[in-house]
Amino acid sequence: MKKIFAANWKLQKTPAQAKEFCETFRAQLVAHTYFWDHKEVFIFPQNFSLDTVIHATNDTPVFVGPQNIHFEKSGAFTGENSAAFAKDMGAKTILLGHSERRQFFGETNEALNKKVKLCQELDLLPVFCIGETLAQREANETEKVCFEQLTQSLNGIDKSKRMIVAYEPVWAIGTGKVATVAQVKEIHEKLYHKMSDLNFTNFQLLYGGSVKPDNAQELLQVPHVDGFLIGGAALEVDSFMKICSH
Ligand code: PEP
């Protein structure tokens, strides 16, 4: 199975900076058949840079998409972004349920369920984030919280369609605190079985949270870790390439 490397640029990189990143990345990899035979790369730019990234990578297999969408395709929703419009621009994927969306913008499992369904309707591949806060981990609620996020947000969807789930402990995002191999192993094992019990037949599990070039290799060896969702270390071509090279 191909390993997945997904870059979440958050509210960073202007179109010019995004173009520069993609041109450098593309120049090193566009003709690298071995790389593309073994890896999948996703980039989630800020929406104003989306078109630039789609065009700058259009001769590569990179999956590009927004970091959030509204659950309706169109209508009176001032300030929102449409998955249908993203698809029309050439997007192939959508990042959903990132903890910053849940934490700062009140995104609920119920709203996410509608968003996942819309992605499936439009044939856009969801990269769906779950994860517990530090307080939840300390209260031994990691499994309960992650399972609730999965069951509530993925309820009633087509389980034969491809689905990528990114486990990101909130306390490890942008903090430099990486979950230990033992912690990742334990939860990924449980998530794998939960997804199978829920009858998902085509899914991959990512780990995210302070992944860097120097910890990528050991984390990628953990069973049921099919790749990474990467924030800070995906902002520079060099460190992103180093992680992708594992
Ligand atoms: C993220 O934003 O999804 C993330 C994992 O960030 P970082 O790699 O910076 O912790």
Image (cartoon, grey):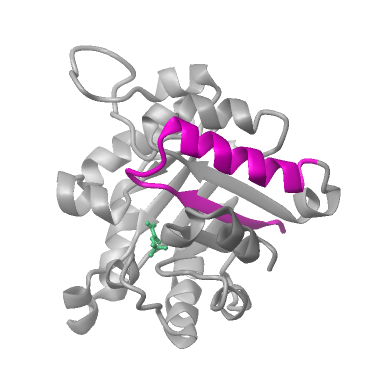
* Residue at the far bottom in the pictured view: 182
* Residue 46 sits above or below residue 2 on the image: above
Residue placed most toward the observer, 118 or 54: 54
Does residue 243 appear to the left or right of 47 in the view shown? right
Residue placed most toward the observer, 22 or 109: 22
| Residue 217, horizontal then vertical, whole percent | 62, 76
* Residue at the far top in the pictured view: 75
- For the N terminus, which image quadrant? bottom right
Q: Residue at x 55, y 23 (%)?
A: 90
Ligand 1's image quarter is bottom left
* Residue 146 sits above or below residue 135 on the image: above
Q: Is residue 203 visible?
A: yes
Tell me the quarter of the picture where residue 225 sits.
Answer: bottom right
Q: Is residue 162 visible?
A: no
| Residue 129, horizontal then vertical, whole percent | 38, 54
Q: Say how many tags the image has.
A: 0
Q: Residue at x 63, y 78 (%)?
A: 221
- For the C terminus, which image quadrant? bottom right
Residue placed most toward the observer, 9 or 197: 9
| Residue 91, horizontal then vertical, whole percent | 52, 28
| Residue 93, horizontal then vertical, whole percent | 51, 36
Q: Residue at x 80, y 51 (%)?
A: 37
* Residue 100 sits above or below residue 72 on the image: below
Where does the magenta region start and end?
1-30
Q: Is residue 12 magenta?
A: yes
Q: Is residue 228 magenta?
A: no
Residue placed most toward the observer, 206 or 122: 206
